[in-house]
Amino acid sequence: MRISSSARPLAAALSVFALICGSLILARALGYSFALGALSQHMFDHIALLGLAAPASAWVLQRNLPPVSGRMLAAAAAIQIALIWIWHLPPVFEAAQADLIAHLVMVGSLFAAGLFFWCAVLGVAARARWQAILGLLITGKLFCLFAAILVFSPRPLYELANSHAHHGGHGAYTALADQQLAGLIMIAVCPLTYVAAGIAIAVRWISALELAYPEIPKRSALVIPLLLLLAGCSDVQSALHPASLESAEVTRLSWTLFVGGTLIFLIVMGLLVLAALGSEKLRGPLGNNRAIVLGGVAFPVVVLTALLGYGLWMAWSESAEAKAAQDITVQGEQWWWRVTYKQPDASATALSSANEIRIAAGRPVRLQLTSADVIHSFWVPALAGKIDLIPGRTNTLTFTPTKTGTYRGQCAEYCGGPHAMMALRVVVMEPEAYDEWLKAELRPAASPADDQKLVRGQEVFKTACVVCHEIRGTNARGRLGPDLTHLASRGALAGEVLPMSAENIDLWLRENDRLKPNNRMPEFGHLPSDDLSAIVAYLASLK
């Protein structure tokens, strides 16, 4: 039955109303089935409206949309993001939860803003698809930022004790747990609509390119956008660019999983298409008991068992011989790495460094890993697997580097504060170059000699820094912070925060809390400029 043009607005309005009611009923049913708390149920309702009802309603209304410009899309995205953040400010949100009318205004305005945004996306996608994809990307990211605040906040942001009855949770969660669950729901579910819409627009874009440029093979039109993703790949911190015997095994296992998973996915999708569109003769064997047992039980058991055995064999195999290893102790501290090289002669000078490990190519390395405060995780993807550093316990990681170069590592276990800036570098050198470096590193720091500025810098250092830092060859014997004996020979400052240079040493001394928030080193911007310049020159001379 065809709908007359005069009745189409009414039909569209009824469809939108049905979508709103259906999405809310679905969200409420799921919420009560999972016994969600007040805030997590509220988040479920909003996701149903903004991520389900709003895009579906925009799809229904798209025939009646006026021309949309990129500025309208930007305005729609800004309005939606602003309303999300404004309505969820604690005092505003608590007021809306306590008053039914205010709550309805909040829900209505958010749905209207979401509908405006999705209408703008559909309108722009018809002629400027990159703008639509960009709008989806930015909006989804800012929603996830708000969700991250809910997840990682150390205390409840909202007081919902007096929330009205229709948001009354089942009381199974504490306020903080309910808030964290709300954030997790938003992070897990909210981006799905934006990702699905972006993929759909990208597919239409690629199809349009194929029609516009028929001389280009269809495979190329699909491959070119995917090549853009390779810009995020790098061999500095990548498990797919192995630089040791052990990481090569991990890479081999990774590619086995990638290729095997892709093949299984293609087989399953092919069988799914066959089951949906194939003839009765072809579909019949897919539904019998033999196919179910073989494909649903036997095949997964065999494949997963084989992968488990391969993984266990890799974990147990050690390519490096412990007796020939370079022994290095790495101690994780908030938020840097203390590195100590074990000398063959127990009476030899202890060699300590920070945030940088130097090793020789071709020689087995044994890292003794521990922690001075909380649990950290040592991970240099190009060289070895991930291993935890646990207070009071020493774990061992053995590997044999095969390629010279500089490889970045990272603490992979959240340890509070500037955890994301707790990085390190591993420098793999030729054996002869490593031996020369080790000899130079064992020497004490050079004396400032006749340079008055360096002499003054050393004096200031002994006054302001001696409690925390050690410089071999002087009376500085502090152990709270890194050893600075040969500071300037390292490649970076403060765990890869800044490249090593005199200018960056000066910047770090003045503004280290801005550069690495909440680190435990005080700033020294209060020192007289001449003294600060002298200490910078002295530290920059420690090579």
Image: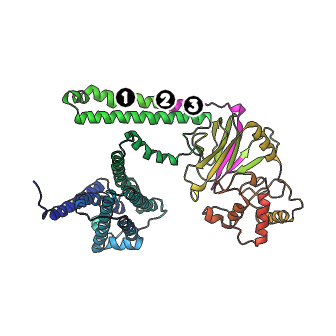
Q: CA distance from mark 3 to mark 2?
A: 11 Å
Q: Is residue 190 left or right of residue 412?
A: left
Q: Earlier in the sequence, mark 2 or mark 1?
A: 1
- In the image, what residue occupies the spot 41% across and 35% down? 261
Q: Earlier in the sequence, mark 3 or mark 2?
A: 2
Q: Looking at this view, is 206 or 1 the one in front?
A: 206
Secondary structure at badge 2 equals helix
The residue carrying mark 2 is 309
Secondary structure at badge 3 equals helix
Spot occupied by residue 444 in the image (x, y as percentages of width and height): 83, 51
Span colored in magenta: 310-339
Q: Residues within 10 Å of mark 2 (few under 14, many from 20)?
A: few
Spot occupied by residue 472 in the image (x, y as percentages of width and height): 81, 53
| Quarter of the rendering containing residue 242 | top right
| Quarter of the rendering containing residue 344 | top right
Q: Looking at this view, is 166 or 81 the one in front?
A: 81
Name the amino acid, label 1: Phe
Spot occupied by residue 118 in the image (x, y as percentages of width and height): 31, 61
Q: Looking at this view, is 491 or 445 the one in front?
A: 491
The residue carrying mark 1 is 299
For the residues bearing labels 2 and 1, Cβ distance under 8 angstroms = no
- In the image, what residue occupies the spot 60% across and 39% down? 384
Q: Earlier in the sequence, mark 3 or mark 1?
A: 1
The residue carrying mark 3 is 316
Q: Looking at this view, is 106 or 397 the one in front?
A: 106
Secondary structure at badge 1 equals helix
